[in-house]
Structure formats: C-alpha cells, structure tokens
Image (cartoon, helix red, strand yellow):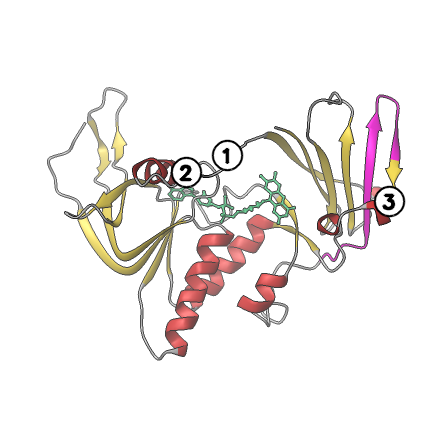
Amino acid sequence: MTSPTPRETMEFDVVIVGAGPAGLSAAIRLKQLAAEAGKEITVCVLEKGSEVGAHILSGAVIDPISLNELIPDWKEKGAPIDTPVTDDRFLYLGPSGSLRFPNFLFPPLMSNHGNYIVSLGNVCRWLAKQAEELGVEVYPGFAAAEVLYDEKGSVKGVATGDMGIGRDGKPKASFTRGMELHGKYTFIGEGVRGSLAKQLMARFKLGENCDPQKFGIGLKELWQLPPEKHKRGLVVHTMGWPLTDDTGGGSFMYHFGEGLVSIVRAAP
Ligand SMILES: Cc1cc2nc3c(=O)[nH]c(=O)nc-3n(C[C@H](O)[C@H](O)[C@H](O)COP(=O)(O)OP(=O)(O)OC[C@H]3O[C@@H](n4cnc5c(N)ncnc54)[C@H](O)[C@@H]3O)c2cc1C
C-alpha cells in the first residue's frame, strides 16, 4: 500500500543505520573529530530494536584495543567492562568426555590475555549514552526500511517504514507515515545480512571480486549459576561432539558478571 501523504523529512550531516558497536563508534568518532576541528555536525543513529542493545545477542570476549583509542577513560566513565579473562581453555568433546588442548598450541588469535568478557548489549547501551552526551541523536524503535537516492543515483538517506498498517494492507487508526532522514553521508551499520546493505551490495555491485559470504547458525543461552559453580573470568571453547568430524563449528562458554554464563553452540 502506498500512502498519498508525503513523508516528513529531517536533514543531518550523517545518518547512521544500526546502533551496534560499529554504528555507535562511528557516531562518537565523527563527533570527536568535528569537536577537534571546532565544527558542529549533526549525526543521528536509527536502531530497529525497541532499545539500544535489544538486538545485540553476543555474550562476547572483547579486545579493548579499539575502545582504548575511542574512549581512553572508559573505566572512569563506568563502561560495563569489568570481567577480565582469567583462564582460557580449549576442549575437544567426545560423547562421554573431553580432551583439553594445551594453551601453547593456540594461535595468537585464540589467546584472550588482556581481553574482557562482556554483555555486548550492555556495552552498546553504554556507548549510546556516550554518543548522546556528545550530541548524537539516537532513535531506538525505528527500522530504516528503504534507501533513498537522489536524481544522480547517489544515496541521500533512508526512510523508516510506515507503521499501523492492518493485515488487509489498509491503514489502521494508529497509522503513522514513515520519516525520511537525509544525510550528506549515510553509514550502514546493520551488522550481518542487513536488509538495506543487501540492496546496496546488489545495486552498486559491492560483492564483485569478493569471496562469497559464509553464514552459520548458533543458539545462545544466558545462564545464572549458583556461586559455587561460577568461575568468573573463565573462557571455554570447544569443538567436536555432537558435530561430526567433517562439520565445522563448536561452542563457547563465558563466565562473567555476577554468576552469569553465556553459552553458544554454532555450526556453519
Ligand atoms: C553468537 C555470537 C558471538 C560472538 N562473539 C563475539 C566475541 O566473543 N567477540 C567479538 O569480538 N565478537 C563476537 N561476535 C561478533 C560481534 O557480535 C560482531 O562483530 C559485532 O556485533 C558487529 O557489530 P556491528 O555494529 O557491525 O553489528 P551488530 O552488532 O549486528 O549491530 C547492528 C545493529 O543494527 C541494527 N539494525 C540492523 N538493521 C537495521 C535497520 N534496517 N534499521 C535500524 N537498525 C538496524 C540491529 O538491530 C543492531 O542493533 C559474536 C557474534 C555472535 C552472533
């Protein structure tokens, strides 16, 4: 259904789609650079989750190297990054037991020394607060549904979808027309398989001469453990059972916070 009502338009210097680590860090950095140059720029971030962090699922081990550069005083600013990795194990699972690989066999990428276990959703909530303090406008609850192009075919922004449309395709009493957000620059930070990113990749042939993308599926659970079973700072990765030898994938288990464990099992 197309509504005859024209959409309202808001103008920004930069429109960012997605309040994940990428979108929020970009917003913060742009504001920092503008302030350093003595300039004022307008930056907005659209997030389709009902709140920032609502769609950020990974219970993650993060290397703080980028955050050290972006917000060097993140500790003083209360970043929810307070579980350093204290023990790092890699297990090969069988149907009735496990075999631990010695740590010196890990490639450097698998070493978590100096890293932290976090809720990435909470880190994003905190990043959004830092962004807002710098004057970034963050709009949760709004999905960018359409890429907008100017007469030359360049991206000029995005539009949010119409809301309040009935199953019959007709507007309900709650109908609200989507908004157009125009930017001198539009930054797509939708994460993997973004719906707008897929359209842009097709239109501008961004996937040409690149390796094909590869996806897996994972199941994530967050457990609350009794104190005697919780080992704050422990990171365990596994491979093997129940996957067969010719199937990649594995699992991870991160003990963090007050009795929490993130558990994920994934396979491509
Ligand atoms: C199970 C799992 C475990 C992981 N573990 C780790 C780990 O231990 N360490 C690590 O460093 N990394 C880990 N990662 C990877 C890490 O989560 C990603 O690299 C990171 O989140 C990517 O950030 P991003 O901002 O690009 O995208 P995302 O984090 O995916 O954020 C994208 C945001 O954009 C929003 N969005 C998407 N489309 C739209 C739209 N059209 N309009 C408005 N909003 C939109 C989404 O709701 C979301 O909030 C893990 C990932 C998964 C899935």
Amino acid on which disc 3 is placed: Glu
| Position of 71 relative to 177 (above/below) | below
Residue at 37% across / 78% down in the picture?
Answer: 37
Instruction: Report the residue that reaches farthest toward the bottom.
Output: 38
- Residue type at mark 2? Gly
Q: Say which element carries label 2.
A: loop
Determine which residue is flagged by label 1.
213
Element type at marker 1?
loop
State which tag comes first along the sequence, 3 or 1. Answer: 1
Magenta segment: does it hold 97? yes
Discs 3, 1 touching: Cβ within 8 Å:
no
Dot in front, 3 or 1: 1
Whole-number angstrom distance, CA of label 1 to CA of label 2: 9 Å
How far across and down, in percent of the image, does residue 255 sit? 75, 46
Q: Nearer the viewer, residue 246 or 76?
A: 246
Q: Would residue 236 appear left or right of 77 to someone viewing this image?
A: right
Q: Looking at the image, do the residues carrying marks 1 and 2 touch, with CB atoms under 8 Å apart? A: yes
* Magenta residues, start to end: 83-99
- Which is more N-terminal, label 2 or label 1? 2
Choose mark 2 or mark 3, whichever is in front: 2
The amino acid type, in three-letter code, at marker 1 is: Gln
Other residues around mark 3 within 10 Å, as few (<14) / some (14–19) / many (≥20): few
Q: Which residue is mark 2?
A: 207
- Magenta region includes residue 106: no
x and y, in percent, of residue 10 in the image: 22, 55
Give the image location of residue 164, x and y in percent.
26, 33
Which residue is nearer to you in this view: 119 or 116?
116
Q: What's the residue at 88%, 44% (across, down)?
A: 102
Q: Residue at x 41, y 72 (%)?
A: 33
Check residue 228 in the rendering and tell me which mark sits there, or answer none: 3
